[in-house]
Image (cartoon, rainbow, N blue to C red):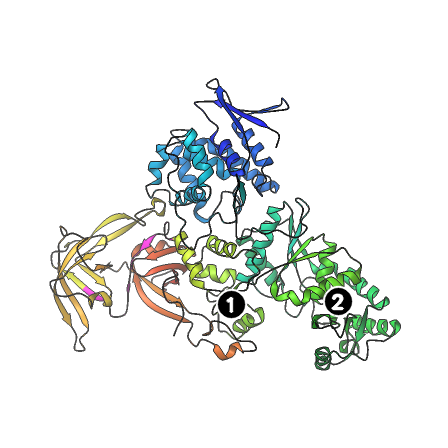
Amino acid sequence: MEDATLAFPSDAPPLSVICAAKIAGLSLAVDPGLPSGSPPVLRFSSGKELSGTKTLLRYVGHVATLPNFYLRGAFETGEINQWIEDATKFSSGSEFEDACLRVDGFLSQRTFLVGYNLSIADVAVWSGLAGSGQRWESLRKTTRFPNLTRWYNSITTEYNAPLTEATSAYVGKRGLGKPIAKPKGTSEMQITSGTVGKEKTVSSFEVDLPGAKIGEVGLRFAPEPSGYLHIGHAKAALLNQYFAQRYMGRLIIRFDDTNPSKESSEFVDNLMKDIDTLGVKYEAVTYTSDYFDQLMKMVEDLIAKGKAYVDDTPREQMQKERMDGIESKCRNNTVEQNMALWKEMIQGSERGLECCVRGKLDMQAPNKSLRDPVYYRCNLVPHHRIGPKYKVYPTYDFACPFVDSIEGITHALRSSEYHDRNDQYYWILDDMGLRKVQIYEFSRLNLVYTLLSKRKLLWFVQNGRVEGWDDARFPTVQGIVRRGLNIEALIQFILEQGASKNLNLMEWDKLWTINKKIIDPICPRHTAVLKDRRVLLILTDGPEKSFVRILPRHKKYEGAGTKATTYTKNIWIDNADASSVLVGEEVTLMDWGNAIIKDIEKDQDGNVSRLTGALHLEGSVKTTKLKLTWLPETDELVHLLLVEFDYLITKKKLDEGEDFLDVLNPCTRRETSAFGDANMRNLKQGEILQLERKGYFRCDAPFIRPSKPIVLYAIPDGRQQTSSK
């Protein structure tokens, strides 16, 4: 950056420009000597000038070396510019709290204002808050804006040194105080990188793509449409997006649709749904099937050059010969013989069905992937896009390097499980005479008690062990979202793993802990009592006529709305609570007050059947041991079905060669009937709530009619046991 001086009135420093420059490590001389009311000016040593806070902020974002600090794709850059415009509302008295409320709602499922990186949009809004001084500090200490406070605290923590330096000089001597500790298990701000003086903030993904150049990187996320996107694919998708944004490159979605026996349009549609759910931004959607004619011409060229041949060896024998390094009897067929058999394959004839095309690589190579891999096979199943036009289809190993090179991919990101096939990838590209593509490896995301093989997941679907690919027990994106996972928690969890090549086995508890920290501050609270052996508590001095109070659905978050709570003389409580109380004990009835238990009735088996008590509303809730949830005895209660899930298998990790069918979990779903407060009639499908003292739930089936229960899926919170014993 050219040497420059930032001039501004002493009573109106452009805090966002100063903060952005300090975060980016840019050196600016300052001159607070402009007349009051003047716009800030950036004066360059060349004599040129730029004027206005917004213009200067964009300039700093443009020249900063931080990846994606300002210039991104057209849409996200437009979003950044819009936030810069909106940031001015934080300096307007009447609009300040309205602006806080709007941004708080926007941040309910986001870590940053735009995309997955810190941008000058974040700096602009952060500076607007910090620049308001005590007004924001007072609001920050309340619980009115939990998402905005979380976001503000994260940026403050990550960039405490430069931001404190700026605010101490231009907002107040107190600055930002001590850094606010990050909650364990969160990853907020971890994907941001930048130089501040001589310090560097390093993200989990802070690695370099070999040979990558800004503006010239081409990446692809290439799922096979043979299932739904699962958590392992999500890591690959987000990692591709991260590097595309970091290097200001392009990302395409390519469907690797080379096996019509496994693929369908349903899977394509749902993969696109999952990609959109993850918020992955891409330039185009392509299909390997777009290149079938070119791939067929390429394999014919390789046959003509003696670099490929047609083999009619039976599959099992071929596999054994590859293992033993024995050349096929067909390896030295003439070009004419190979082309004749290739034509039989194209026609899908009986003779052609006996054959496959193999690359002529190195049958004695220690790396067995180089031992003449299969390039083409016959398949008479119609293709989901093209129909019955083709009878031959390329293998992934043959098609992938070709399409990568043709589509301008510079770096192919693949999980380390493909490591042994990298040499094959490069060999095939060389034989094709195409531009080289650089492979970059990252570790596969492995989770305990979890199968990620689409073949194994398909078994559960086909055998009716789950409801479908979106079943809440599945590790698919749709499955875990249906179970109650906030997509932002998934993104944070995956970004924490970064681009590391180290193999590790992750615990689900860490993901659910992140999820709880996102949903707890904003999800509404409701009450439920388990149907089985529920106990009636009769309050002798309770209201003879029921009455209703309007209470907040979340005491610390106004955005959750309100609910109507009915108070009656007779109330229901859980059997477990009724069995815990003693005669004469004072307990707290939540959202009401204290009561004293006067009498306990039991049945012939010794189970509590009825309680009698008296209200003691002047009693202190701080002195009671038991805080009881309750429901009024009324016909307005709704029927609930509470569903808990367990892992599909009983072993944390399968051993090499171990069959997953040997470790199937016999019981993966448990249902409990309950009653809920009448307000739950208004729950929407997908809404997340907390049942007081019972945990977090997601509404899978909302209220339809009184005879049909509302179905609530239990959401793990990272602390409770999630595996059956």
Residue at left offset 24%, top offset 65%: 574
| Residue 531 covered by magenta stretch | yes
Residue placed under numbered mark 2 in the picture: 390
State the extent of the magenta-drawn residues as a range. 520-536
Question: From the viewer's perspective, is 252 left or right of 238?
Answer: right
- Report if the CB atoms under discs 2 and 1 are less than 8 Å apart: no
Residue placed under numbered mark 1 in the picture: 468
Give the percent coordinates (x, y) of residue 102: 42, 39
Q: Mark 1: few, some, or many residues within 10 Å (few <14, many ≥20)?
A: some
Q: Hey, what amino acid is under mark 2? A: Tyr
Q: Quadrant of the C terminus?
A: bottom left
Give me the disc on residue 724. Answer: none
Q: Mark 2: few, some, or many residues within 10 Å (few <14, many ≥20)?
A: some
Give the percent coordinates (x, y) of residue 302: 82, 65
Dividing the picture into quadrants, the one containing residue 600 is: bottom left
**Helix, strand or loop at disc 2?**
loop
Marks 2/1: CA–CA distance: 30 Å
